[in-house]
Amino acid sequence: MFVNQTKAGIDKAKANGIKFGRKNGSTNKKTAKKVEKIEIYLKAKKSYDWISKELSVSKKTISDIKKFLS
C-alpha cells in the first residue's frame, strides 16, 4: 500500500519538474581527499572490506579508483 503511494508521489513530483539525485557529473566532495589513502592501502594489499570500513567509502568507489590506477 505505502509503496504505491510513494511511487505515485514521486511520479507526481517528476511530472512537476522536480529532479531527484545528484546532478550529472557531480561527485562526493569528501571522497576526493581519500583517494590518496585508498591508493596507498591498495598498494599495501589491504582488502576492499578493510579500506571501506577504515575510510567510510563504498567498495564500488575503491574499485573505480583501482581501475583508474591500472
Image (cartoon, helix red, strand yellow):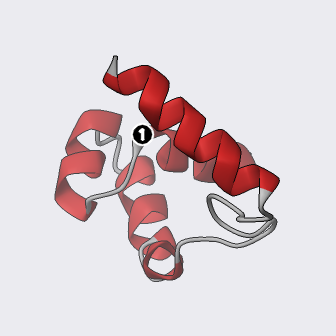
**Residue depicted at 42% across the width and 74% down the height:** 34
**Residue depicted at 52% across the width and 50% down the height:** 61
Can the viewer see residue 69? no
Counting every numbered tag in the picture gives 1
Quadrant where the N terminus sits is: top left
Can the viewer see residue 41? yes
- Picture quadrant of residue 69: bottom right
Q: In terms of depth relative to the viewer, which is nearer, 64 or 41?
A: 64
Give the image location of residue 62, x and y in percent: 49, 47
Q: In terms of depth relative to the viewer, which is nearer, 47 or 31?
A: 31
Residue extending farthest to the top is 1
**Residue depicted at 49% across the width and 61% down the height:** 39
Give the image location of residue 45, x and y in percent: 35, 40
Quadrant where the C terminus sits is: top right
- Picture quadrant of residue 7: top right
From this view, report whether residue 40 is shown above or below residue 50.
Answer: below
Is 7 displayed left or right of 46 in the figure? right
Give the image location of residue 40, x and y in percent: 41, 63
Is 27 displayed left or right of 41 in the figure? right
